[in-house]
Amino acid sequence: MSKRTLDNCRLVKKFGRPVQYDGVCEGFGRGDYDDEPCDKCKECPLHYLNAESEVDNVRETFCSGEEES
């Protein structure tokens, strides 16, 4: 399986690029009047909310003195 990137996202290929910065993505809204990210985007590890939580997990592990596996 290839690594998940913004370039190989099937939604990006189908609809074009949503707002992206620093390797993370804001995702696609649910509709013209709803900017809440669609469910597929919310599940994506490249969505900014997931990317931030990953950084928080690493920070918590580092600050607690535990080794990350």
Image (cartoon, rainbow, N blue to C red):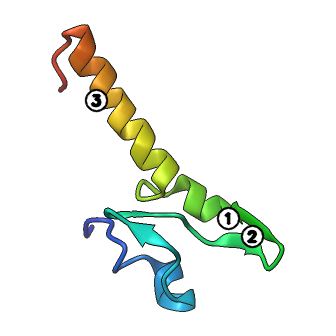
Locate residue 23: give its quadrant: bottom left
Residue at x 80% of width, y 80% of height: 32
Mark 3 is on which residue type?
A: Val
Q: Secondary structure at mark 1?
A: loop
User: Mark 1 and 2 residues: CB-CB less than 8 Å, in contact?
Assistant: yes
Point out residue 18 in the picture as x, y percentages from the top left corner.
Answer: 53, 77
Report the residue marked by disc 3: 58
State which tag comes first along the sequence, 1 or 2.
2
Q: Is residue 32 left or right of residue 48?
A: right
Mark 2 is on which residue type?
A: Arg
Q: In the rendered image, which quarter contains the N terminus?
A: bottom left
Q: Secondary structure at mark 3?
A: helix
Q: Label 3 neighbourhood size at 10 Å, few (<14), some (14-19), many (20+)?
A: some
Location of residue 45 with respect to 35 vertically, above or below: above
Locate residue 3: give its quadrant: bottom left
Residue at x 33% of width, y 37% of height: 55
Point out residue 25 in the picture as x, y percentages from the top left corner.
Answer: 46, 65
Report the residue marked by disc 1: 38
Point out residue 35 in the picture as x, y percentages from the top left corner.
Answer: 73, 66
Q: Is residue 23 left or right of residue 38?
A: left
State which tag comes first along the sequence, 3 or 1.
1
Q: Secondary structure at mark 2?
A: strand
Q: Which mark is residue 30?
A: 2
Residue at x 43% of width, y 76% of height: 9
Residue at x 34% of width, y 80% of height: 7
- Cα separation, mark 3 vs mark 2, equals 30 Å
Q: Label 1 neighbourhood size at 10 Å, few (<14), some (14-19), many (20+)?
A: some
Q: Is residue 26 left or right of residue 34?
A: left
Mark 1 is on which residue type?
A: Cys
**Which of 43/26 is in front?**
26
- Cα separation, mark 3 vs mark 1, equals 26 Å
